[in-house]
């Protein structure tokens, strides 16, 4: 009888998908906060991660997809390989190229283990049925096949590599900023084709999401964070409070509320250390204006 019960239990286990352990799911929940997934993939009044949020850009309005485990309208049928291909290569399970409004150009730098922990966390949540909304973008930017050419010009796949000359703290901050946090996607100006201008990385732009002005976060004394201390940058990431006691507004307020405020003090300090380690870039107006 015991043998029969053991064989039955084994059969059930083989027939059921493996469940992630609690530690991996908890790590995935933390990494989701570091990646800013909550705000972008949750529409006002909608279910968490069910998508449908409008993102206005100079190229049109994009609607974020459902990333819950719903099998029909979300990512419930995605394998680990599908998930990694989407985030690292910008290609859907059906083989379609994603538009670069999806920050795969940054997520490609994330460690696969971190990305799969994010997937495990998302799959641990209740699925929500929410059909995808069609993007409202003009010709020729609406042609998905053209994204293959865009990638040849502007996309450099590959995992983050720490700098041997930098401290572990600075490298941790670089990983959070460049990969998971994808800060450059908003804080770096783009050329007319939508490629980021590497020479002005993190130097701010007037054409951020929804037409917002996104500030320079390099340590330039006049237009960036040059007058800020590490503690002041870390405090902004924790509470949204600037050194002049004003608060961040717009999408950055969401980044703080749904993302950076949930990070550890050590990770916020690492981000600050990395930003202050960068070469200053003078770009845009004075932060006092």
Image (cartoon, rainbow, N blue to C red):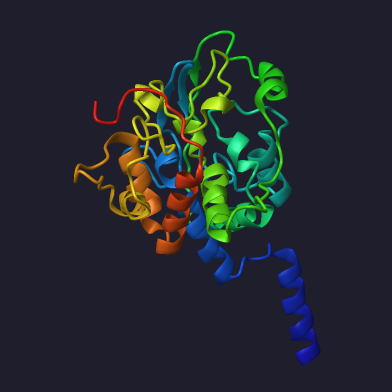
Res 41 → quadrant: top left
> Could you tell me residue 226's position as x and y percent?
37, 40
In the displayed structure image, the side of residue 6 where residue 278 appears, left or right: left
Residue depicted at x 25% and y 48%: 241
In front of the other: 145 or 249: 249
In front of the other: 62 or 214: 214
> Could you tell me residue 49's position as x and y percent?
45, 45
Residue depicted at x 42% and y 27%: 282
Q: Against 170, is 264 above or below?
A: below
In the displayed structure image, the side of residue 236 where residue 65 appears, left or right: right
Q: Is residue 235 visible?
A: yes
Residue depicted at x 45% and y 42%: 50
Residue placed farthest to the bottom in the image? 1
Q: Against 158, is 101 above or below?
A: above
Quarter of the image that includes the N terminus = bottom right
Residue placed farthest to the top in the image? 139
> Could you tell me residue 80's position as x and y percent?
70, 51
Q: Against 202, is 263 above or below?
A: below
Quarter of the image that includes the C terminus = top left
In front of the other: 183 or 126: 183
Q: Is residue 1 visible?
A: no
> Could you tell me residue 45's position as x and y percent?
31, 40
In front of the other: 225 or 92: 225
In the displayed structure image, the side of residue 128 where residue 145 appears, left or right: right
Q: Against 164, is 288 above or below?
A: above
Counting every numbered tag in the picture gives 0
In the displayed structure image, the side of residue 137 where residue 114 appears, left or right: right
Res 3 → quadrant: bottom right
């Amino acid at each position: 009888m015991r043998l029969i019960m053991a064989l039955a239990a084994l059969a059930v286990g083989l027939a059921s998908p493996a469940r992630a352990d609690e530690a991996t799911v908890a790590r995935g929940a933390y990494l989701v906060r570091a990646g800013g997934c909550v705000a972008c993939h949750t529409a006002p009044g909608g279910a968490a991660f069910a998508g449908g949020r409008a993102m206005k850009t100079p190229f049109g309005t994009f609607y974020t997809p459902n990333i819950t485990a719903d099998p029909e309208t979300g990512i419930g049928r995605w394998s680990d390989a599908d998930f990694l291909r989407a985030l690292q290569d910008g290609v859907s399970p059906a083989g379609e190229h994603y538009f670069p409004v999806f920050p795969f150009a940054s997520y490609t730098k994330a460690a696969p283990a971190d990305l799969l922990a994010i997937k495990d966390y998302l799959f641990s949540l209740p699925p929500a049925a929410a059909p995808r909304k069609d993007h409202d973008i003009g010709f020729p930017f609406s042609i998905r096949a053209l994204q293959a050419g865009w990638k040849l010009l502007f996309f450099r796949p590959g995992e983050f590599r720490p700098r041997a000359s930098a401290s572990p703290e600075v490298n941790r901050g670089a990983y959070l900023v460049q990969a998971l946090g994808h800060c450059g996607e908003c804080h770096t100006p783009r050329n007319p084709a939508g490629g980021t201008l590497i020479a002005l990385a993190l130097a701010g732009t007037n054409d951020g999401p929804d037409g917002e002005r996104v500030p320079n976060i390099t340590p330039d004394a006049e237009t960036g964070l040059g007058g800020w201390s590490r503690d002041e940058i870390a405090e902004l990431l924790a509470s949204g409070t600037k050194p002049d006691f004003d608060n961040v507004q717009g999408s950055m307020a969401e980044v703080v509320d749904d993302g950076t405020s949930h990070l550890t003090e050590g990770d916020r300090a690492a981000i600050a250390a990395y930003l202050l380690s960068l070469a200053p870039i003078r770009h845009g107006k004075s932060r006092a204006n």
